[in-house]
Image (tube, grey):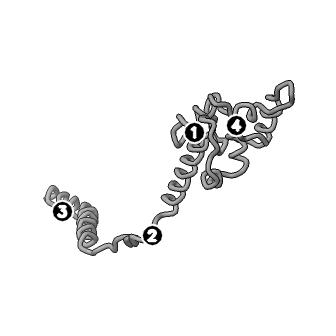
Amino acid sequence: MRSILAAIARVLRAMPRFVYQRMLIAGEWVARLVAVPADPVPDAGTVPAAAIAQAEDDEHTKAVRAIAAHLVNRQIPSPTLSGAVSESEFDWLLACTPAMLRSIIAADNVALRDHIRNRKAIRGVLINDARVVEAFVADLTDENGRDVESAWVPSMAR
């Protein structure tokens, strides 16, 4: 008789846990049946801001590379191409030597973008900072007082 009462007591003690587990299973089942609203689908006409910024950065680095290619080949960049970069960036590109310009052309988009934003420099390339560019150009004058940039790009004399 004692064993029967002990068995009934064990069943009664286990009952809340059993009921709780079954209620969890039933709740999960109901949650699966109830439809959860999906995220709204963006319109085909709207483009995320990050994609726009990435496209602008890519266009900017493409313009910097094109200007560098013109300067390496001793050509004058077109006004529309020159207008794609700021005046300080254009002065920076004018101050760069042909070896620096070749490094700029060869750099990938991320490295060039980081160099322009002064996050991580490309080895052997002048830093894109107005004071550094001024000091670099001032240090590179010949005995006649001409800028080296004017000497290697004759049509760009200031």
Looking at the picture, which amino acid does disc 2 mark? Thr
| Three-letter amino acid code of the residue under disc 1 | Ala
How many C-alpha atoms fall within 10 Å of the one at disc 4: few (<14), some, or many (≥20)?
Answer: many
Q: Position of residue 23 (x, y in %)?
A: 26, 69
- SS for dot 4: loop
What's the residue type where badge 3 is placed? Ile
Tag 2's secondary structure?
loop
Looking at the rendered structure, which numbered label has been put on residue 99?
Answer: none
Residue bearing mark 4: 127
* Image side of residue 135 versus residue 155, left or right: right
Q: Earlier in the sequence, mark 2 or mark 3?
A: 3
Q: Viewer-nearest of labels 2 and 3?
A: 2
Q: Residues within 10 Å of mark 2 (few under 14, many from 20)?
A: few
Mark sitting earlier along the chain (2/1): 2
- The residue that label 3 is drawn on is 8
Check the picture and name the quadrant holding the C terminus. top right
User: Which type of secondary structure does the marked residue at label 1 adopt?
Assistant: helix
Q: Is residue 123 above or below residue 78?
A: above
- Judging by the rendered image, the residue that carries numbered circle 2 is 46
Mark 1 packing: few (<14 Cα in 10 Å), some, or many (20+)?
some
**How many other residues sit within 10 Å of disc 3, few (<14), some (14-19) or many (≥20)?**
few
Examine the image and state in which quarter residue 18 appears.
bottom left
- Residue 33 as seen in the image, left or right of residue 141: left
Tell which circle, 3 or 4, labels the residue nearer the N-terminal end.
3
Which numbered circle lies on residue 69? 1
Determine which quarter of the picture holds residue 115: top right
* Residue 107, horizontal then vertical, whole percent: 54, 36
Depth-wise, is mark 1 or mark 4 nearer the camera? Answer: 1
- Under circle 3, the secondary element is helix
User: Reading the chain from its start, which is encountered first: label 1 or label 4?
Assistant: 1
